[in-house]
Image (cartoon, grey):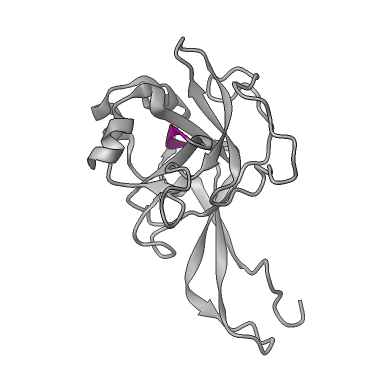
Amino acid sequence: MCNRARFKGEPETLFGATSELFAERPRDNRFNPQELRPKSRNYVIREDEGGRRGWDVMTWDVLGGQASWPMTNVRNLKLPQWRKLAEKPENRCLVPLTEFAEFTPEKHDLGDGKPPLKGEMWFSVTDQPVFAVAGFWQATKDGGSFAMVTCDPNELVAPIHPKAMITILKPEDCDKWLSGSYQDILDLQRPYDASAMEVQGPVFPTRQKAGA
């Protein structure tokens, strides 16, 4: 579920955030927010203890490497381990994206003599070139780590991934996600309007179709 995403931009005043970073921006080639993958370090927006909203850099794995696989997405906010984060505004964050990917359910034969493989379908939001995804974060031994919150899929995402989609917020709901009550955020955990989204694909970044 959504283990590929992109943010094509730089820290600026999005969703009420200041343009400054809470933590120093990493200075190495492993930091590439334009291609988000599990365990990569990416930008998020959060509020500090004084209520100041700004940018931070965190790892996309809310358990900080303490499980057999990265915990990149969270669905059941009533489970005790997630509710303790959901109830606290200081543990909520916004994840700015420009698009996200889901793999096709079926494999495709590309006619190149190699085994069939699944393609990537890339989703974007037509009324928000940069959109905010609901998220949670916590401090781990390796620093701040975050996950995206998922919800039921809309009719555009469901044919590709019938179990869930990421929770995309409307701009006017970002304040409520960061500072509202536990019930407020449960109410915001809903699919985005499919008519305000589009999808492209399938694409096969590791191989090209024959003749392409």
Between 42 and 16, the one lying in front of the other is: 42
Q: Where does residue 145 sit, x and y in percent of width and height? A: 49, 37
> Which quarter of the image is occupied by the N terminus?
bottom left
Residue depicted at x 51% and y 65%: 103
Give the prevailing secondary structure in the magenta stretch.
strand
Looking at the image, which residue is at 60% across and 17% down? Answer: 18
* Residue extending farthest top: 50
| Residue stretch in magenta | 133-140
Note whether 116 is above or below 44 in the view shown. Answer: below
Locate residue 159: give its quadrant.
Answer: bottom left
State the count of labels. 0
The verdict on residue 124 being magenta is no
168 left or right, relative to 16: left
Q: Residue furthest bottom?
A: 113
Q: Quadrant of residue 27?
A: top right
* Residue pictured at 65% horizontal, 24% vertical: 12
Query: Could you tell me which quadrant the C terminus lies in?
Result: bottom right
Question: Which residue sits at x=33%, y=42%?
Answer: 190
**Whether residue 49 is situated above or below residue 1 in the rendered picture:** above
Q: Residue 86 location, x and y as percent?
A: 31, 32
Residue 38 seen in render: yes
Judge by depth and name the residue closer to the eye, 35 or 145. 145
